[in-house]
Amino acid sequence: MRAPIFRIISAVSAAVVGVLGYLVLWPIPAEPVAWSTPTAPGYTGVYALNTRLADLHTVGIGSEFGPEHIAIGPDNRLYTAMTSGDLVRMDLDGGNQQVFANTGGRVLGFDFDRNGLMIAADAMKGLIAIAGDGSVTLLGDHVSPDDPIGYANSVVVAADGMVYFTDSSTRFSPAHYGNTLEASILDIMEQSATGRVLAYDPASRTIRIVAHGLSFANGVVLLGDGHTLFVSETGRYRIWRIDGHARDLDVKSGSPQAGIVLDNLPGYPDNLMRGRDGRIWVGLFRPRNPAADSLAGSPFMRKILLRLPRFLLPAGQRYGHVFAINENGQVTEDLQDPTGAYPETTGATETADRLYIHSLHAPVLGWTELRARNLKSAFLASYLPRRRSLPNRGQIKETAMSMKTAITAAALSTAGMISAAHAQDAPSIVLVHGAWANGSSWVEVVPLLQQHRLHVVALHNPESSFEADVAATRRVIDDQPGKVILVGHSYGGAVITEAGNNDKVKALVYVAAFAPAPGQSVNAIVGAAPQPPAWQGEIHADAQGWLTWSADGMAKYFAPDIAPKAAALLAATQAPLFSGAFDGKVTAAAYTSKPSWYVVADNDQIIPPQLQQIFADRMKATTIHVASSHVAMLSQPQVVADAILAAVEGTR
């Protein structure tokens, strides 16, 4: 027996040594360097969470996908560059589509000169010109004989004919690595900052270096003076102002010819496009990832990561985001879709009544009506600041109490009908607690429901993993004799979103809860949203990865509006949460097929109320606002009970 066991141990040891040797020693083309990254701002301030980019109109593009760059041609038609290498043109409504050219490479950006000729940056080939008949002419693939253009990306043509374009990396060429994605990953992970801005003079047919030293130089646009440029530096989350007259300028030299306009963006900036009324549109194709940022000072770890399959690399979640700035770099418009339904938003092209959204991988072309967007913007400007403003706290409370009174009155009417109903017709109410809690968190709500002759179950989930919590909830649902109203608080909202895909479940009620989209986890939402102080330093992890709240943090942030003794009891009886539970992804969202109610806690410091409203809007829920902390079921149990009763009646 010893010999086989010894051979197994030897084989396992050899395998482990082999894997470690591969991760540490296998040669890769990148040599990562350390750099300093600022803490991500999250979606706050001018980038406050919103849904103004959600529910886009779409134009079908057949078998094509990835309209990475969109522009209006001199013939007032839409032109777009696809992943296939096709350049497609169409009417502004998407009709009369035709492929007018294929470069055999991948065009990432283009503009039109004064003669109507398309000037394009092809990542595989260099700077090219494309005539109306589809014929392609190479303008340049070298700055000099020993200085090739490795990664042509974006282009803009000045009124005097000068062509400015970006060369994202002199280290990693898509032509060499087979595609733009691999070259981009290598360059951004290495951070050697070899990106540059080039200028092509059509009169002399020469190319010169305008500026260098950029970490993945990307979008480029001209300002009103005809020679100053805004340039996206994707790898370091910022936008530069660069004088187009400069020659071989190092952007980090301190020269007045280059300066940062916008720094520490919440995502990776891509295309820059001139809009109307002085607007310049910016696309963020992914939000920042905290894990990726944390590796900025660790070249060795980034080198190890580059030896792994690409799907294991830390990447931001799908998230739609475009915004507009003026020539002073001030943000004037901001449109987001936290669901990322239209993936990798690389830019936006504006007409008089539409905003067309660029995308790296979308199978359609998305657009939104500007009139609707402006109306929504006016609403946000007039309403949201007032809701968040302390001087209007009394108004908020008055509104919340008025809503509470109305809901209570409706619920009392509902209660009479529920009480008169035969017991077997009444649904079971299954209450799912949030993280760091158990079934006792519903202690104030349960008797309010039971007095209406409802069968109530407040379950205790293990909190060891998302999958385990969903499985435990499904067991309770299956055990009920008839239909079920499923209620979730906080993290429990993610659980009911998945577990609610059951024929017994007739309605969902979310109480200050997460509501992920399919393919999304709680951690993905938390990583994209601003983290309030409660998430910073108040949670302790033990040696096995189980998380608990401090008593002070629980009282100050989690439950500040209940009695101190009750908050202390909440902290003392909290159930530890395993750190990996928030990583579980929803596969199918029950709220897409079932009626939903959502109780928004307006004073919540754990899940921002604006984010709760986004969840409610996305699921088209009947929404109730309550002036409470995160634990609305403890501080405002009647409002929560009334919402559940309304769901009972709404599904009769």
Image (tube, helix red, strand yellow):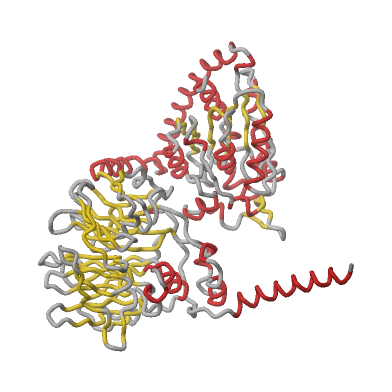
* Direction from residue 480 to residue 596 in the image, left or right: left
Instruction: Tell me what residue is drawn at x 51 percent, y 46 percent.
Output: 607
- 587 on left or right of 150: right
Residue 58 against residue 251 in the figure, above or below: above
Would residue 616 be found to the left or right of residue 284 on screen?
A: right
The image shows residue 455 at horizontal and vertical percentages of 66, 23
Name the outermost residue toward the bottom. Answer: 146
Q: Looking at the figure, which quarter contains the N terminus?
A: bottom right
Could you say where residue 365 lies in the image, as x and y percent from the top left?
30, 50
| Residue at (23% x, 42% y) in the render | 371
Q: Determine the image quadrant of residue 475.
A: top right
- Residue 160, by quadrant, is bottom left
Q: Is residue 341 above or below residue 399?
A: below
Rendered view: 217 above or below 421: below
Residue nearest the viewer, comparing 30 with 525: 30
Residue 355 at what x, y percent from top left? Answer: 25, 50
Q: Of all residues shown, which one is farthest toward the right?
A: 1
Task: Please give the name of the residue rendered at 66% of the width and 56% of the height, measured from the top-left corner.
Answer: 540
Label total for image: 0
Q: Position of residue 397 (x, y in %)?
A: 45, 33
Q: Is residue 576 visible?
A: yes
- Taking depth in this image into account, of 651 and 82 the one nearest to the observer is 82
Residue closer to the observer: 532 or 202: 202
Q: Which residue appears at 42% of the width and 50% of the height?
A: 340
Residue 565 appears in the rendering: no
- Above or below residue 257? Residue 643 is above
In the foreground, 15 or 33:
15
